[in-house]
Image (spheres, rainbow, N blue to C red):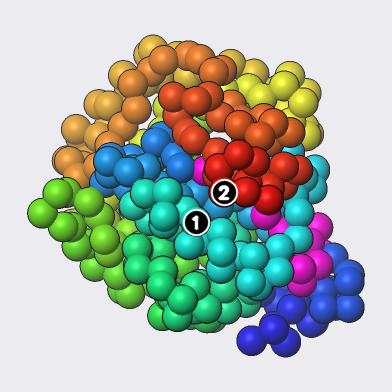
Amino acid sequence: MQTRYSPCTLCPRNCGADRLGGKTGYCKETAALRIAAATIHRGEEPPITGSGGSGTIFISGCNLGCRFCQNYQISQEGLGKALSPEAFVRLCLVLQEEGAENINLVTGSHAVPALAAGITAARSQGLSIPVLWNSSAYELPSTLSLMESVLDLYLPDLKTLDPALGARFFHASDYPEHAQKSILWMLEKRPLRFTGAHRLVSGVLIRHLVLPDYLESTKTVLQWFAEKAQGKALLSVMMQYTPVPGAPGETGNPPNPGPGKLDRYVHTQEYEQVLAWLDAFAITEGFYQELVPDTGWIPDFSRFQPFSSDLSRSVWHWKEGYGAIAGP
Ligand code: SF4
């Protein structure tokens, strides 16, 4: 499986980089698995958070590189530390010991071989909670199949179905094509299954972030969900778009001319329009956020506690390791 790193064809970017030889492609990562942080996170959707919180592992690098990414410090600026396979297994087991409901692998599309091996090893050493794939969906089913046997849940984004926006926001006009294929593949593999406590233990939860000024893109995504995924997946409509100071290409000066500078929160009228479309498309299975303009949840991965303490509890950090929680 490691050979898939060289030449790297793991994702639609198809860079061909010799990552085992220390080279990098668009994702800016070699074959070494690097992690930025691990937290017990309470900000995911209720059936993912449960009562114990989700055991999020933030992987360094990204094959998509949204220019408004809230996690740009780790996705595009390289914060993180290489972990050995043994250290990765320990991290999963510590999250489980700390009460995590699941292991939540965040943005690992460029690191599938290492993560598949790591979760397989962790399972053999006692990891028993569900494992969740939290991704942009800019992926290939042939790569996702390398992880299929170790994943229980999928949490893909469906960012847009407009190729022009894919090109503008992440240099990927083929994003809609690949995201649709990947999500349809996930729907086939994991039907929805809950425990009695309304925790999702198998299935797909599709996330869509509403972008200010790009409501037509949202409407298309909602229509797609109603036609292709209703009854097979949950939908999570996220209203939390926040301009992130310092993010590459962010706010006020878009690389291409267009209506949306992405320099503001979603307006109330836009929020109400999205809710009306949810009604119009009869989408009832899922979640939408309240409209609360707030920057308090934006993480800072230079700190041991990247998120506010009411949102998450840090377990491991790239600079400080386990800190006080589990010794050095
Ligand atoms: S995983 Fe990285 S190096 Fe490989 S094809 Fe994708 S962006 Fe390129």
Give the residues in magenta: 25-39
Quadrant of the image for the N terminus? Answer: bottom right
In the rendered structure, which amino acid carries the disc numbered 2? Ala
As measured in the structure, the alpha-carbon distance from the residue carrying label 1 to the one carrying label 2 is 8 Å
Residue 77 higher or lower than 59, as above or below = above
- 244 on left or right of 278: right
Q: Nearer the viewer, residue 109 or 266?
A: 109
Q: Residue at x 58, y 26 (%)?
A: 298
Residue 38 in magenta stretch: yes
Please rate how many residues cluster around mark 1, counting C-alpha atoms within 10 Å: few if below 14, some from 14 to 19, many from 20: many
Q: Residue at x 41, y 69 (%)?
A: 127
The residue that mark 1 highlights is 94
Pinpoint residue 203: horizontal percent, then vertical percent.
29, 62
Please rate how many residues cluster around mark 2, counting C-alpha atoms within 10 Å: few if below 14, some from 14 to 19, many from 20: few
The residue that mark 2 highlights is 326
Disc 1 + disc 2, Cβ < 8 Å? yes
Q: Residue at x 62, y 32 (%)?
A: 306
Regarding mark 2 in the picture, which secondary structure is present there? loop
Pinpoint residue 233: horizontal percent, then vertical percent.
27, 56
